Image (cartoon, rainbow, N blue to C red):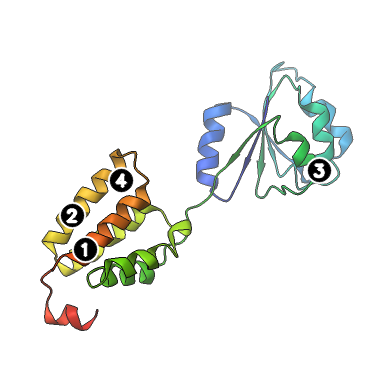
Amino acid sequence: MIKIFTGDDRVKASAEIKKTLGENYEVIDAADLTPKDLPQIFKGTTIFEAHRKILLRDFTANAAIYPELTKYLDTPHEIILLETKLDKRLNTYKEIKDKLEIKEFKLPPKTDFSATYNIYNIAKRDGKKAVEELRKIEKDEDPIRFTGLLISQAMKEFSPKILKELSKLDMNLKSSKIDPWLLVESFLLSMGKQKYKISEHQAQNL
């Protein structure tokens, strides 16, 4: 069994490695390996273990050995290749992508707080415009995290009515099968149709 773990979220990747291989496994840095080393790693046994559990770091980054991987797909051992990046343009990747399990662990995108707060304020005046602004960042944002930022903004303004509606939205996001962004957009549109009491100071900041 060979699996490939890639991506920049090493915390989640490490948790999945332990879940797959357990607590005791060999760790091999692939940077200095040559093709001659591979038979012993993928097919060989040790005096202690016939069935081995191995973590290979940055295997695909070593151009000398990566193409050799196709020769060892039937390894009897449990092996995980931990890669910082995985070049999907290479022929070797195209050969193995349907034969191995590949998991990507990505860190969440950085949230643009100013964009979120801007959308919140726009929604109080014009729900449709707020939705237009939201669609510019949807692909790089998470709907639950975005809603959490809306809640924090409503709490700063102490807007009980908005907080109540946001609480409903948060529950719906976690339980409904409807596209989460549609739920968020619906909330923004509803904000634009309602009159919320805000202070003079808040109004000056809109």
| Disc 4 target residue | 173
Query: Which comes before the other along the chain, label 1 or label 4?
Result: 4
Closer to the observer: label 1 or label 4?
1
Query: Which comes before the other along the chain, label 2 or label 1?
Result: 2
Q: Name the amino acid, label 4.
A: Leu
Q: CA distance from mark 4 to mark 3?
A: 41 Å
Q: Secondary structure at mark 2?
A: helix
The N terminus, quarter of image: top right
Q: CA distance from mark 4 to mark 2?
A: 12 Å
The C terminus, quarter of image: bottom left
Between 197 and 69, which is closer to the camera in this rendering?
Answer: 197
Closer to the observer: label 1 or label 3?
1
* Mark 1 residue crowding within 10 angstroms, few (<14) / some (14–19) / many (20+): many
The image shows residue 43 at horizontal and vertical percentages of 79, 22
* Mark 4 residue crowding within 10 angstroms, few (<14) / some (14–19) / many (20+): many
Q: CA distance from mark 2 to mark 1?
A: 9 Å
Q: Secondary structure at mark 4?
A: helix
Q: Name which residue lies at 86% across and 39% down.
A: 34
**Which of the 4 image quarters holds residue 198?**
bottom left
Q: Which mark is on residue 165? A: 2
Q: Name the amino acid, label 1.
A: Met
Between 200 and 22, which is closer to the camera in this rendering?
Answer: 200
Closer to the observer: label 3 or label 2?
2
Q: Name the amino acid, label 3.
A: Asn
Query: Which comes before the other along the chain, label 4 or label 3?
Result: 3
| Disc 3 target residue | 91
Q: Which mark is on residue 191? A: 1
Q: Secondary structure at mark 3?
A: helix
